[in-house]
Image (cartoon, grey):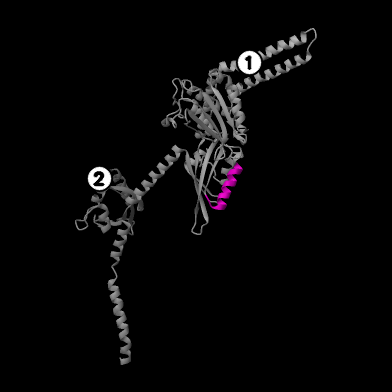
Amino acid sequence: MTNKTAKNTQPNRRALTRIRKQDSRTLPTGTYLARAQRLTRTGSWVYRISSGRSFWSLELFQIFGFDAKGKKPALSALLERVHPEDRLDVQSKIDRAVRERRGCEHRYRLLFLDGSIKHIHAVLDPVADRSSEVYEIVGTATDITEQIRGETELRRSEAYLAEAQRISHTGCWARNPISGALFWSQEEWRIFGLDPEKTKLSYELFLQMIHPEDRRYVEETSKQAVEEAKGYEIPFRVVLRDGSIKYIHSVGKPFFEADGKVTEYIGVSMDVTERKRDEEALQLAQAELARIARLTTIGELAASIAHEINQPLAAVHANSLAAARWLGAEVPNVFEATQALQDISRDARRASDVIGRIRALLKDQKPTYVALDVNDVIREVIAIIQSALRARGVSIRTDLSATLPAARGDRVQLQQVILNLIMNGVDAMTLVTDRPPMLRLESRIDPSGNVLVAVDDTGAGLETALLDRIFEPLFTTKAHGMGMGLAICKSIVESHGGRIWALPHQPHGATFQFTVPTTEDGA
């Protein structure tokens, strides 16, 4: 070998040495396999049928709770670790694998002395020789306890969610705004009265079930929400296949990709049909209670009403006699007779107006919200109650704004509120003897632009602590009161979009005030 060749060989030897050193750091294949089994929680075993000998990997010792440094357990020891309820099944699967020379997968449980349980996923693979005789079984056992625990928790959560949806009548849904693909939870299917096994779900089907009067509104609202990538709330009705109607309140929220593009809308649908029916029943009950309260008030005013009607009727009678005398004279006085007949007509209209106002108060009908002059409503109530106030010695003064804008409300219900507040004021002044009983009715515009009506009295007044409680149902300061009058007034005013409250009136008495929105604000 020449010197030149020797020089060239030295670097190659050094490289080979370096490679060998690197190879010396490489772990044996068995070590990698053991590490892989530990990471996957999978143990392996081999059982020789002829000799009864077996091989266990280190991870299998760990899974079954045996000491790897101790004596290797027999197959029977492995079976003893199996839960008693699963042991027969495990043995039968091993026997069948040998008998049919076919592998299988199965699950079973391990039961330890401390009562703890592990869940195992096992794989059996029988190995046969050339004569098709099985001479050994190769198997694996994977600890899937955490997986089972997770699956159990997931099923429990899903069960809780489904039960919560059923109890609250709330279904959940998801919709792809691009493809139109739709997902419904089980409760959503129930709300819409459809069978998921027999119905092909689509957005078009959903739209077809919406009440025709609400369909356009739902389409436009959801379309606008998608275009603007924002959430929405939509109340609407659906018509089920049996013709019944349900009231739904749906809420949707968009989900975005990283680029800000909406990928999906997720939301809930709440069946508020029962709530809607309860609200309607409550409104009917309130209306009936209000009508009964009006009847009670009219009953208390019966004497005043009779007097109010008797006055024009007496005038009609007197004028009719006068007209007869003028016409029966030796020289008939046609002019005086005509005047008497005109007075008869005027008094008849007066009596008719009184009856009309009373009939309006006693009507059992749904509220009719129209534009009205609150001052006219106040004057109509005063006309009904004027005689009763005079009989009790109560004087009444009005301070009505001439520039009052039109309010939006139900005339009869507002008459009832004003009538009730006036009668409360009259009752509050019954026992007062050191000052004349006087009522004052005022109308004006409040700082918020609403029409405000105030009723002042010079009665005993109200304690400050009672100002908030007097509007509660069944609470009363009267000896024989039912505690419903002011509660009904509060319900009526709030249904109009206004509010009602009380405050002390100086120097004596109390002031009750309520507001009604104008026609510009709505009700």
Q: Quadrant of the C terminus?
A: top right
Residue 358 locus on image (x, y percent): 60, 21
| 420 to 102, vertically: above or below | above
Residue 509 appears in the picture as rendered: yes
Residue farthest right in this picture: 331
Callout 1: SS: helix
| Residues under numbered marks 2 and 1 in contact, where contact means CB atoms less than 8 Å apart | no
Q: Amino acid at mark 1?
A: Gln
Residue 164 locus on image (x, y percent): 42, 40
Callout 2: SS: loop
| 264 to 4, vertically: above or below | above
How far apart, in angstroms, are the residues tagged by discs 2 and 1? 98 Å
Instruction: Quadrant for residue 159, please give it.
Output: top left
Q: Which residue is mark 1?
A: 311
Q: How many marks?
A: 2
Q: Which residues are magenta?
A: 215-230
Q: Quadrant of the N terminus?
A: bottom left
Residue 417 appears in the picture as rendered: no
Residue 160, disc: none
Camera-nearest residue between 332 and 500: 332
Camera-nearest residue between 355 and 318: 318
Disc with the residue nearer the chain's start (2 vs 1) = 2
Say left or right for 11 vs 258. left
Magenta stretch encompasses residue 224: yes
Crowd around label 1: few <14 · some 14–19 · many ≥20 (10 Å):
few
| 462 to 1, vertically: above or below | above
Looking at the image, which residue is at 58% across and 31% down?
399
Magenta-colored segment: predominant secondary structure: helix
Residue 62 locus on image (x, y percent): 25, 55
Residue 115, disc: 2
